Image (spheres, rainbow, N blue to C red):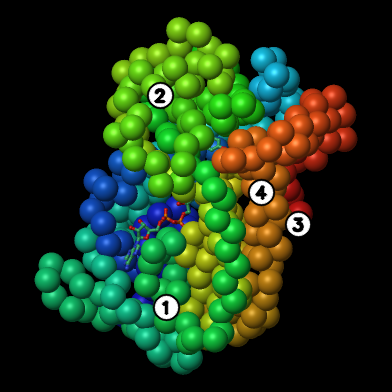
Amino acid sequence: MRTQVGIVGAGPAGLVLARLLERAGIESVVLESRSRDHVEQRVRAGVLEHGTVQLLDELGVAERLHREGLLHHGIWLRFEEANHYVPMTELTGRSITVYGQQEVVKDLIAARLEAGLPLLFEAEATAVEGIDERPRVRFRVDGTDEELECDVVAGCDGSHGVSRAAIPAGVLAEHVRDYPFGWLGILAQVAPASEELIYAWNERGFALHSMRTPELSRLYVQCRPDEDLAGWPDERIWSELQLRLGLPGFEGPIVERGVTQMRGHVVEPMQHGRLFLAGDAAHIVPPTGAKGLNLAVHDVRVLADALVRWYAGGDESGLAGYSERCLRRVWRAEHFSYFMTTMLHRLPGGDDFGARLQLAQLRYVATSEAQARALAENYVGLETV
Ligand code: APR
Ligand code: PHB
């Protein structure tokens, strides 16, 4: 099999890239190790920056997003038993949309298949080779080994993928920050108790109220990074959420649950030879800033632009500058996620001093327009970084 751009992974990064290339008349093949059902059902975060929504619009895959997505104009910060509103739209002129990541993925898969373009499920890439001049992706489908030859490989295979391993030892620098927290996330059949998201600081730990539809709430409580779900029966989850969010009586049937570790991870550079890493394959942010999907989309937008210029007339400059351009935004988002995470979570074994500092910062954001604007412009997505 041969194509121009071999794309490993059908998460948001791989699928948005495929669509961008389709629009530019560049061929691609997308290989995805899991089943269509699996990737369409995987529950992840769901905050889309203004620029992400605009891009999905331009790509013609935002019709359902506009119908079902929930437009938000601010967030609540909750601490010391009171909610403080950060009016994001008023401060920045922009808004965010809450629409589950798997819904974005479903819409992109539908568009790809409707266009009759190659997207192979249950096709696991086992190795990426020849990235210095003649890239090939080896993959396994239906029990047979196959090979995809291409001009360029886009490694969009998430944090546990295989693409990154194709880069020779010593080339990549890895930067890691493990936060000593986890998030226990649930999806519950109960109408959201708030129109806007609530980020809550509490002595018992952080909690977040988000939502998916007028009937479905998405909620998180801070837990240990290696938390065992068995220690969290429904009653405990609800009583912690009620206390931390200040929502007595708020509960409903839980339809999905899981624990996420909080981690920052960046590899530099994001490219080597003809392999370009994008999205979680190159970087992870803790979910407090809701940046993961938006960064993935930004990467592939930069990559697609660079590929268009390269195919149009051999201009290599976009490809050569890919990593640097993406990493500027990645590090801004790492910092914002770090800022939100460290401001809002209770440090296990942490002292009173740390808690006082957090509260001082929260009060500052709640009362200073400059501080609120700084938070808001990062949250809705900076136009230039
Ligand atoms: N071969 C083929 N596909 C693979 C392989 C492999 N060897 N390894 C992983 N994959 C697939 C995964 O099954 C997944 O569908 O690559 C895809 C990677 O998708 P994501 O993990 O969603 O990563 P990305 O597209 O970069 O999107 C970033 O995902 O983790 C969230 O919060 C994060 O919102 C952010 C978004
Ligand atoms: C979510 O809705 O899943 C969500 C919202 C905001 C975050 C993280 C996750 O910061």
Residue 261's x, y, as percent? 47, 48
Q: CA distance from mark 3 to mark 4?
A: 17 Å
How busy is the neighbourhood of tag 3: few (under 14 within 10 Å), some, or many (20 plus)? few
| Image quadrant in which the C terminus is located | bottom right
Residue type beneath disc 3 = Val
User: Which picture quadrant has residue 129?
Assistant: bottom left
Q: Nearer the viewer, residue 200 or 132?
A: 200
Q: Element under label 1?
A: helix
Foreground of the two, 148 or 177: 177
Where is mark 2, residue-wise? 237
Residue at image x 61%, y 26%? 203
Residue type at mark 1?
Ala
Q: Identify whether 182 is placed above or below 298.
A: above
Mark 1 or 4, nearer chain start: 1
Residue at mark 1: 165
Residue placed farthest to the top in the image? 249
**Figure quarter occupied by ligand 1:** bottom left
Mark 1 / mark 3, whichever is N-terminal: 1
User: What is the three-letter code of the residue carrying label 4?
Assistant: Tyr
Most extreme residue toward the bottom is 133
Between tags 1 and 3, which lies in front?
1
Mark 3 — residue? 385
**Closer to the eye: label 3 or 2:** 2
Q: Earlier in the sequence, mark 1 or mark 2?
A: 1
Say which mark, if any, is on residue 267: none
Residue corresponding to mark 4: 338
Mark 2: which amino acid?
A: Ile
| Distance from Cα at disc 1 to Cα at disc 2 | 39 Å
Residue at 47% over, 82% down: 167
